[in-house]
Every structure is written in structure tokens, then in C-alpha cells.
């Protein structure tokens, strides 16, 4: 996390210095020419730095998962008839989802198999007086 802070500060400092330099050159260019000043080409290093910064700032959001906590226990699971097995897929059973202050049933569905992994279905876990949803995932 410290690295992200340093990277953000570095990018902000470079941006501020460039913005100030460009605005000064553009204002003088506008007074002498009728066309806008040409923006200098970016070096490959600056483009890579900007791309790395964008990836580092966006990547954590892609892996973030919402923590779902319900104040009451889920109802017992519904009985679902599992369809006939399909090659290359595993059945993910139906579950109770907490939405807008109540449980809503979500029917089961097929998950594509990941070679070398086994499917761990999602489930509710009691944490103190509340219930927390643990999302289904692939495990080795």
C-alpha cells in the first residue's frame, strides 16, 4: 500500500509540473500564432509509467468482493432436482441470497470445470449474532 501512495504522489508531481510548463508555452504560442501549440510526444517510459499506475489503481477493485452479512439465519435449503451430469461442468446448488432485508432463493446452475480444481459451494457461516455469506470458489 505504501508503494501505491508513492506512485500516486510521483504521478501527481509530474502531472503538475507538466501542466504548468504546457500552460505557459501554450499561452505564449496562442498570442503569436492562430493555431494551437503542438503537444510534445510522450516518451515510452512515461507511457509505461502511466499504464502501470492505471493498472495498480484499478486492479484491486477487480478482485474486491462484497461482504454479505445477514442479521438472521437463512431458511433451510430448498430441495432441487439436480439435472443429469454434463461433461465439462459441475452443478452449483441453489442458495439463499440476502437482498433488501430478506432472503431470496437463487436456483442452481452449471459451473464450467477448472482442471485440477474442485468446486467448493457457497455457504452461510455464523459470525456472532450475524450470518456471513462465503462465496463459492475453486480449490486445489
Image: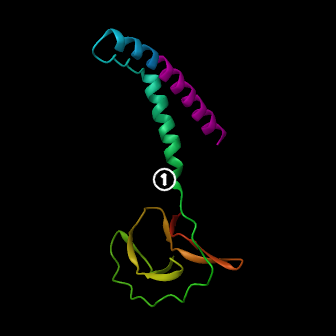
59 shown above or below 70 = above
Single out the residue that lies furthest toward the left: 34
- Which stretch is magenta? 1-21
Q: Nearer the viewer, residue 86 or 81?
A: 81
Left or right, residue 92 beside residue 72: left
Q: Nearer the viewer, residue 115 or 72?
A: 72
Left or right, residue 52 beside residue 8: left
Q: Residue at x 47, y 23 (%)?
A: 45
32 shown above or below 128 = above
Q: Position of residue 79 (x, y in %)?
A: 45, 91
Check the picture and name the quadrant holding the C terminus: bottom right
Q: Position of residue 63 (x, y in %)?
A: 52, 55
Question: Which residue is tagged 1?
Answer: 62
Q: Position of residue 124 (x, y in %)?
A: 58, 77
Left or right, residue 104 beside residue 10: left
Tag 1 secondary structure: helix
Q: Residue at x 34, y 83 (%)?
A: 83
**Callout 1 crowding tier (Cα within 10 Å): few <14, some 14–19, many ≥20:** few
Q: Position of residue 113 (x, y in %)?
A: 40, 66
The dominant secondary structure in magenta is helix
User: For residue 54: magenta?
Assistant: no
Amino acid at each position: 500500500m505504501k508503494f501505491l501512495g508513492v506512485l500516486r504522489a510521483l504521478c501527481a508531481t509530474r502531472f503538475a509540473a507538466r501542466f504548468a510548463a504546457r500552460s505557459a508555452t501554450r499561452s505564449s504560442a496562442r498570442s503569436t500564432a492562430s493555431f494551437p501549440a503542438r503537444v510534445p510526444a510522450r516518451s515510452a517510459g512515461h507511457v509505461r509509467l502511466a499504464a502501470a499506475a492505471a493498472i495498480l489503481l484499478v486492479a484491486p477493485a477487480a478482485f474486491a468482493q462484497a461482504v454479505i452479512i445477514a442479521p438472521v439465519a437463512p431458511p433451510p435449503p430448498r430441495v432441487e432436482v439436480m439435472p443429469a451430469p454434463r461433461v465439462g461442468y459441475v452443478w452449483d446448488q441453489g442458495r439463499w441470497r440476502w437482498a433488501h432485508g430478506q432472503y431470496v432463493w437463487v436456483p442452481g446452475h452449471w459451473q464450467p470445470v477448472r482442471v485440477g480444481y474442485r468446486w467448493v459451494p457457497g455457504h452461510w457461516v455464523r459470525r456472532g449474532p450475524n450470518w456471513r455469506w462465503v462465496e463459492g470458489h475453486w480449490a486445489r
